[in-house]
Amino acid sequence: MPDVNEIRLGSINGTHGLKGWVKVFSYTDPLEAILDYSPWILRKGGAEKELAVKGGQVNGKRLIVQLEGVDTRDLAENLIGYEVHVSVDAMPDLEAGEFYWFQLEGLAVRNIDGEVLGKIDHMLETGANDVMVVEPTDDSIDKEQRLIPYLKGDVVKRVDQETGVVTVDWDS
């Protein structure tokens, strides 16, 4: 499993006003939780910038953010299209048995009989519960994509990050 040193939390998709505020599409829940992390590592193509968060707020259904050193609309427009990353070290520690989605992505998925169902490609939020999108691998029992609910105890029996395996109670 690759070593993950940072995680993408959103992207800058517009400007707001004349004083350098940017519109941010946040992957966090709630939206404004992205403001808890600073500095932001901004990436677009081969370009990278590190900027501190000066302030931000929810504005309707959007999030607007003021970044350190960005105080004009022109400077803000130059940031459109940048992805927002933060260091994993900046993420709060979780309780035992809890995981960030990025920690689950790439893990192998086996059923309780030991059969390989594939690996977690990504996670989906459905409202009722999170869902693992499991893509087949060369050693999978078949070539089917599976959508498996992430229900600890009921479906997800064990997550072992050391071995890189999630064990599920799931029929083939």
Image: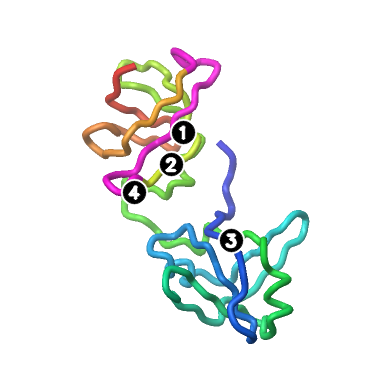
Whether residue 33 appears in magenta in the rendering, the answer is: no
Q: Which residues are magenta?
A: 126-143
Magenta: main secondary structure equals loop
Residue mark closest to the camera, 4 vs 3: 3
- Pointer 3 and pointer 1: residues touching (CB < 8 Å)? no
- Identify the element where label 4 is drawn: loop
Amino acid type for the residue under numbered disc 3: Ser
Residue drawn at 71 percent across, 67 percent down: 49
Circle 3 sits on which residue?
A: 11
Q: Nearer the viewer, residue 65 or 106?
A: 65
Q: Earlier in the sequence, mark 4 or mark 3?
A: 3
- Identify the element where label 1 is drawn: strand
Q: Earlier in the sequence, mark 2 or mark 3?
A: 3
Q: Nearer the viewer, residue 5 or 130?
A: 130
Amino acid type for the residue under numbered disc 1: Ile
Mark sitting on residue 123: 2
Q: Is residue 141 left or right of residue 96?
A: right
Circle 1 sits on which residue?
A: 120
In which quadrant of the rendered image does the C terminus lie?
top left
Q: Is residue 57 left or right of residue 112?
A: right
Residue drawn at 29 percent across, 23 percent down: 170
Amino acid type for the residue under numbered disc 2: Met
- Pointer 2 and pointer 4: residues touching (CB < 8 Å)? no
Q: Give how far apart the Cα atoms at labels 2 and 4 are.
A: 14 Å
Q: Is residue 49 left or right of residue 147?
A: right
Residue mark closest to the camera, 1 vs 2: 2
Circle 4 sits on which residue?
A: 98
Q: How is the image coloured?
A: rainbow
